[in-house]
Image (cartoon, helix red, strand yellow):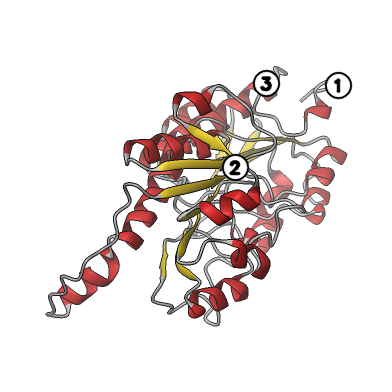
Amino acid sequence: MPSVLIGPYLLRNQPGRFRTVLTQAGFDIIDPQGDFALSPSQLRHYLPRADALLAGGERMTAEMFEIAPGLRVIARTGVGYDLIDLAAASAHRVAVTITPGTNQDSVAEQTFALLLALCRNIVANSQTIHSGGWDRRLVAPVRGKTIGLIGLGRIGQAVAVRARAFGMRILAYDPFVASTFDEQYQVTRVSLDELLAQADVVSLHVPLTAETRGMVNRDFLARMRPGSLLLNTSRGGLVVEADLRESLISGHTAGAGLDVFNHEPPEPGNPLLGLPGVVASPHIAGTDHQSMSDMAQLAAETVVELYHNRWPSGCVVNGDLQKDWRW
């Protein structure tokens, strides 16, 4: 009987449609204990007997593939796969899959939750009231502001839909994605320099790659419009946190809404902790009740499809394995 290891702690020992998909296909399900992503020691313990991994925040290094000779599939519950050594996966004939189309609305909602919290001073006002105060200073509107989207894939487009509903002007920089979406939602394509100079809000929606790592650095922040806001619901590695701290302290950047950090949970010495202009959430943008269920089910379905030697097009990242794929 093939086995599948459950990585995301929100899915371990929990009911869901994904379990039905896997058990009906004959899979034995391995549910480790714990409330965090599987540690390297846990992976070393469980991976040698796993044929598939439903992956969350696990870091799959070349070492992990070496100790898991029976592993055939890593099915990510999400669309990012920067924690997986893709070259090692292909070398070991392990298919890596993602779940496109399942969590973009959740990420977009969290993006606007962070934006509204910053503009409407939600966190500080709530804390003041709980402390016995009553501060009715004016807050900033969202309507009429210009939002600059760096990345206009599924998530960027979902944010644009909501930005249009809020009466915002929408700029976008994405040299790779082209569609008829722009005209429908009145999105203006601009260069990165133009976006940074004009946007009141800069929102990041790009994957973490060698090219994008650390892209939000001192130079990037200096090119942003004075008094603008930065939103990051993508990956913490996009931002040089020390540089963002400097920009926030100087007042050039008025605030930041962050769902992700370089190290998660952020370490006690993280340069952004404690700054009044930072509103943070614990990397939950893509995982609400609905999206988590949808991601888990699609991830399970990709495992079953590959088990039956069918190729789930659009979900497999390392498509070079398709030609000779056999479970």
Label 3 vs label 1, nearer the camera: 3
In the picture provided, is 178 more to the left or to the right than 24?
A: right
**Can you name the residue that lies furthest to the bottom here?**
269
Q: Which residue is mark 1?
A: 324
- The amino acid on which the numbered mark 3 sits, given as a three-letter code, is Ser
Label 2 vs label 3, nearer the camera: 2
Image x and y of residue 177, in percent: 65, 32
As helix, strand or loop, the secondary structure at mark 2 comes to loop
Image x and y of residue 314, in percent: 65, 24
Q: Are marks 3 and 1 in contact (CB under 8 Å)?
A: no
Mark 1 Cα-neighbour bin, 10 Å: few <14, some 14–19, many ≥20: few
Q: Which residue is mark 2?
A: 151
In which quadrant of the rendered view does residue 219 lie?
bottom right
User: Which quarter of the rendered picture does the C terminus lie within?
Assistant: top right
User: Of callouts 2 and 1, which one flags the residue occurring earlier in the amino acid sequence?
Assistant: 2
Q: CA distance from mark 2 to mark 1?
A: 34 Å
At a point 52% along the width and 42% down the height, the residue shown is 171
User: Of callouts 2 and 3, which one flags the residue occurring earlier in the amino acid sequence?
Assistant: 2
